[in-house]
Image (cartoon, grey):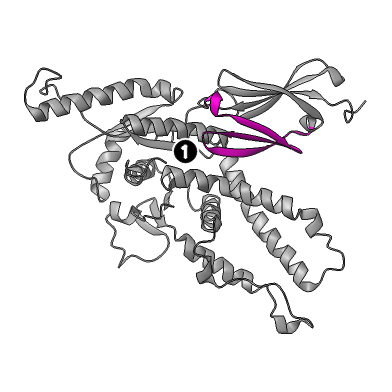
Amino acid sequence: MGKGGVGKTTLAAATAIALARTGDRVLLVSLDRAHSLTVVLAVDVAVRPGGVFSVADGFDALELDTLALLEDRLVTLSALIPAGAEHEHGSPLSLPDPQELTGLPGAEDLIGLAEVARLAHGGDWDAVLVDCPPTGDLLRLLTVPDMVYDYLERIWPRYRRATVPGAQRWQAMAALLVDRLSDSTLPVRAMLADGENTCARMVLTADAVVVAEARRTAAAMSVLGLRIDGVIVNKVLPHHDSVPTNGSDHPVLRWYADRADRERTQLDSLAVTLGGLPVLTADENGHEPVGFDSLAALADALYPAGVDPLTAVDGDSPAQRVELESGSGVESVYALRLRMPLVDPSTLTLGRVEDDLVVGAAGVRRRVKLASVLRRCTTDGAQFEGGDLVIRFRPDPQVWPQ
């Protein structure tokens, strides 16, 4: 993941090659609508088969066409809708033509993530790497599954869908379609919440604006409960002893020295800026790495012998946990700890809606389902402690069991 143009696709392909060399079966999926994966791999789109294609031993790739997937799903759902002529009064339920769904907000995002979840759990590959859309599109994409599920359950809860009194056939079919849509979010939400098996890796360049955006993105990811396992800084100028660091009158050498100094400054502060995440660097080597051989050379430089391409940083605490801090019964104090090490407290918003806590920061918002013990409590303040957002709760005497 990263800002457009920083080299996400190139580094995702290099990582896939490095991982395949360890003996794992790897699938690289592109969700970026720019569809540059085949260009980076130097694969002739005109002659390659559609869908998953083989790049090398143990390394497959796929440019996911989410619109085509959406149209296929619509055809399947349309088959469930009876024609109006079969009903005495006609059926008020209908679905639009596939061509009408091009701009349906969130539909392609959800279907794309659902396909990634299906591929990841299908057993054909040991690891699935996802070349994500640029940062802004990615953050929107990651919020779609929860948003769809929450809205469906609030507008037409499952227990009401299952008990429609005197339901006509079209009403039963509508309930079935909503069930299908709601259920389609479940494997996606489970995949994104699985911190042991799902993580993100940030790609950026050593520029002040890009680093600042990366920090905001890392904060947003922590709000969404998604783990980042490391950072790759791309296109870093290599150090050459023959290039003077200062005092040169030649404009090219001055430019090189100035840019190298700025990059070193950013790199020196990067680990602290991003909460101590592991940082890898990929040098600017003067030519664009296109094709398997060039990408393999990049993989060798990025992941030298003995370095596991998927080595993940171990979190010092779970992303979410509930603790009894003191007291007992109605005198208890409970703490909900949410791991958010990079969130700026000044951007934080908190709210409670029934049994959910709504947390917002860094331009995103997330609904956190409260543990059963906290649902019978009232909130008693919140503060940041060592990278955790801590919300404290006290039992509500009106509903607390005696």
Give the residue at the far left of this rendering. 250
Check the image and report above or below for 28 versus 86: above
Estimate the x, y position of residue 142 in percent, counting from the top left: 53, 45
Q: Is residue 190 magenta?
A: no
Q: Is residue 282 left or right of residue 78?
A: left
Check the image and report above or below for 89 versus 226: below
Q: Is residue 93 left or right of residue 287?
A: right
Which image quadrant: the C terminus? top right
Q: Amino acid at mark 1?
A: Ala
Question: Is residue 326 among what the camera can see?
Answer: yes
Which residue position is annotated with label 1? 200
- Residue at image position (58%, 29%) is 348
Give the residue at the far top of this rendering. 326
Give the residue at the far right of this rendering. 402
Q: Which residues are magenta?
A: 344-372
Mark 1 burial class by Cα count in 10 Å: few <14, some 14-19, many 20+: many
Estimate the x, y position of residue 305 in percent, counting from the top left: 32, 32
Q: Is residue 359 magenta?
A: yes
Check the image and report above or below for 267 versus 174: above
Question: Is residue 227 among what the camera can see?
Answer: no
Estimate the x, y position of residue 330 in percent, counting from the top left: 86, 21
Query: 384 or 188: nearer the eye?
Result: 384
Give the residue at the far front of this rendering. 346
Estimate the x, y position of residue 338 in percent, counting from the top left: 62, 28
- Residue at image position (52%, 69%) is 100
Query: 114 or 263: nearer the eye?
Result: 263
- Residue at image position (33%, 29%) is 208
Please, what secondary structure does the residue beneath circle 1 have? strand
